Amino acid sequence: MEIINKHTLKGSLKSYRNNPFSAFLFLLVMLATVLSFLTLLFLVGYILINGIPNISLDLFDFTYTTENASVMPALINTLIMTALALLVSGPIGIFSAIYLVEYAKRDNRLVNVIRITAETLAGIPSIVYGLFGLLFFVTALGWSYSILAGAFTLAIMILPLIMRTTEEALKSVPDVYREGSYGLGAGKLRTVFKIVLPAAVPGILAGIILATGRIVGETAALIYTAGTVAQIPKNLMSSGRTLSVHMYNLASEGLYMNQAYATAVVLLIIVVIINTISGVVAKKITKE
Amino acid sequence: MTKWKEKFMEFIFLIAACTSVMAVVLICIFLFANGIPAMKEIGFLNFLLGEKWKPSNNIFGILPMILGSIYVTAGAIVIGVPIGVLTSIFMAKFCPKKIYTFLKSSIELMAGIPSVVYGFFGLVILVPFVRETFGGHGSSILTASLLLGMMILPTIVGVSEAALRAVPDQYYEGALALGSTHERSIFFVVLPAAKSGIVAAIVLGIGRAIGETMAVIMVAGNQARMPAGILKGVRTLTANIVIEMGYAADLHREALIATAVVLFVFILIINLSVSVLNRRS
């Protein structure tokens, strides 16, 4: 059986000679694929080749000056921003997923409304979030350009992502777990926290990693909420730029092209790290 | 005691679940409350169909930006969709198992690269490339379309690959059994069966392209005038907001918020069509 289904090179060549149209379709597919991956390779390669020679110790100085265009403050701001946004959005997102999966009745009208609004939130472009952050957190609440305003804006932005991934993770926990827990006399709350949530951790983690990636790459939502000050902020109410905003400023000012290349390398490395971690987590989920 | 705790926590979960509803309501209130009065003051039609944007003369017409967004998005679709769909066919039906994991994670990398990095790449590579090959300034509709076409690739490849994989294997096997080649079976049986998923992928790509801000600003030239040609600069709705929000005041500022309202409505229409498509499939 194996041999019958096996394609040999000679066999496929012959088949393509008899069906030029199929050969044409095959070529089309290959061409597009090569083009897609070559573009990525070119982008990554070009940035690495131009960026790596520009990475120096100066670039990681703790204070930003017009001479070193250091990425260190921006890096630290990115960490603070990510932690804060996840701290706000994580519990809310996980709790709302718990409500949707564990508590809400199926034909609940509220659930439909929540689903629709979460879908809407997921599609809103980041600049609209930025503008809302400017109008609400910065102006109406009077927080001015601050890390806090930026983090809350991002928290709303990543909320649908965390909700959806957590929901899926909770749904994939078999009902047998819940029934077993009830059977042993545990209440609903205890079942959720001690049985269902621990089983769903890898899925929830995957969502949080995805959210981290979005926060790190975000620019448009932050320019008018967290501002563009290139120093480590004194407190959460002062302005500070994240790495992506830093990168945008370097590139659009056009004065620090070498540092911009180096910053792009740092960003790429962070993205690769995030993707690797999420790959590991995903593998763990499928194994279970 | 425990009963009370159960009720209390259920209430907390409910409140958390309502946060997203509250967020959407707040976003709508703040955008519309600031944008609609400005639209009224400028004149609804003057605002939407006005061909001139001159904030210093109190002329606010955003037709150039609406067209800019539409042209750039259309260009991105023309470039990104054929390549993306063909790549997804490769991923789902042609890819040898050995390299699949590697290619899949490459696409995930492509999706994860921040838009500023794409924008920077466009600035240092695509802009000079377009200038030298086609003439003009380099910052143009064409450049922005090329860059956005690249940026929507991972979305289109990911979603349409899933759609192709969801087609039952019998379709493909049936076509083979009737004597079609591998390629014909895929293009004329599997692909049509996955149509609604692929359309959803394209609509998602449109949403991403129309909402993209930073990358477009870096390569599109951003002149606030009617688009004059594929090699001329253009400004999108998103770019209009970012570029001028920093110094705008009074009516100018509100006109920018009204621009965001228009963008928001565009996105709502796109979202609505996605959910209609999803419900149908």
Image (cartoon, grey):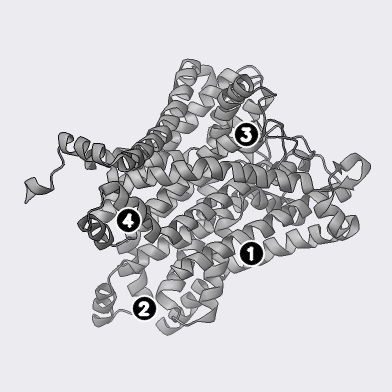
Q: CA distance from mark 3 to mark 2?
A: 58 Å
Q: Does dot 1 land on a helix, a strand or a loop?
A: helix
For the residues tagged 4 and 1, is the chain the same? yes
Q: Quadrant of residue A26?
A: top left
Give the number of the mark in front: 4 or 1: 4
Please name the amino acid that badge 3 sits on.
Leu
Residue denoted by label 1:
B24
The chain under label 4 reads B
Give the number of the mark in front: 4 or 2: 4
Residue denoted by label 2:
A188
Q: Residue at x 55, y 69 (%)?
A: A116
The chain under label 3 reads B
Please name the amino acid that badge 2 sits on.
Lys
Residue denoted by label 4:
B165
Q: Does dot 4 land on a helix, a strand or a loop?
A: helix
For the residues tagged 4 and 3, is the chain the same? yes
Task: Give above or below for A88 relative to B107.
Answer: below
Q: Residues within 10 Å of mark 4 (few under 14, many from 20)?
A: some
Percent coordinates x, y for residue B167 in the rendering: 32, 60
Please name the amino acid that badge 4 sits on.
Arg
Q: CA distance from mark 4 to mark 1?
A: 34 Å
Q: CA distance from mark 2 to mark 1?
A: 30 Å
The chain under label 2 reads A
